[in-house]
Image: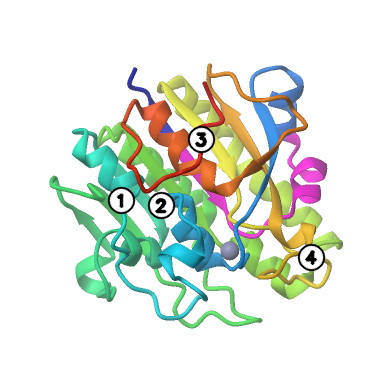
Amino acid sequence: MANKLLLIILDGVPYANWRRLFGNLEGWVEAGEAQVWRMRSVLPSTSACCYASIHTGLTPQVHRIWDNADIRRLEFPDIFSEATKAGMKTGAVTHSYWSEFFNRAPFDVVRDIEYDEPGGPITHGRFHTMKGYGHDNQMTPADYDLFGTLTRLCEVKGIDYGILHTCTLDSMGHRFYHDCEAMDNACFSMDATLAPFIDRWRRGGYEVIVTADHGQDGRGHHGGTGEAQRDFALYYFGPAEGPAPDVLLDQLQLAPTILSRLGVPQPETMKGESFLF
Ligand SMILES: [Zn+2]
């Protein structure tokens, strides 16, 4: 059975902050319209390593992304490649790393900042680089604009699978740490900005997953093994059933789960099992 699905990755939000601060997401859970689980990232719990694992279902020890440096085109099947092979249209509104991993590298800002390529693997790409990023200079686009861009890919281009990734909360967490008024407000604002788009995507017939790539600890750190560094929430909007609420999900399950919801065969490289059925 083929479904349409959107994957929303809010970079670097620890489990506790999801459950404490995202009132719209939690309201849908309380109303029985969404399901939520805890998911644990691969190791290292570093952004680029997690992006590669999210889309290939492989550990960093296999895909060999060890750090946020040395980004290359990955040589493994991923969600884009398999969905395209099945005749689906894909979309990405993300950091440029995703274009480099799953389409071509290095990223040429003029050629690659946006493209429409019917042959895929990313049919419609809309990217940003965060060039100039630093502790005091986030360089993240407005999340409202990113959500709007993804919605255009849904409503104008008719994508079957889309991913959106934003570093706003990761950047703020590195700067302010997670237990403070600035982060309370940042998470509140993200939840309020995202909610009307989720409602619109659901009305448009999309299943939606909202989650993170990894968490962050009390000093805004991630990369290592601490639960706060690795663990985040995963919210699912759609008709499928999942495991019991207290089951800890593995990040390597995400790619096979999305392919199964899209009705696309799971490549042999992906060893994880779908957690939705
Ligand atoms: Zn990250």
Identify which residue is drawn at 79% across, 65% down: 217
Quick one: label 2 or label 1, which is nearer the N terminus?
Answer: 2
- Find residue 243 and report its horizontal and vertical position in percent: 66, 25
* In the depicted structure, whether residue 35 falls above or below residue 107: above
Query: What's the magenta region?
Result: 6-23
* Observer-nearest of 1 and 99: 1
Contact between labelled residues 3 and 4, with CB atoms less than 8 Å apart: no
Instruction: From the image, tell me which residue sits under label 3.
Output: 273
Q: Amino acid at mark 1?
A: Pro
Label 2 to label 4: alpha-carbon separation: 26 Å
Q: Which residue is mark 1?
A: 77
Residue 77 appears left or right of 17? left
| In contact (CB < 8 Å): disc 2 and disc 4 | no
Q: Residue at x 36, y 29 (%)?
A: 262
Q: Secondary structure at mark 2?
A: helix
Of mark 4 and mark 1, the one earlier in the sequence is 1
Q: Which quadrant does the N terminus fall into?
A: top left
- Give yes or no for contact between labels 2 and 1 (Cβ–Cβ under 8 Å): yes
Q: Which is in the foreground here, disc 3 or disc 1?
A: 3
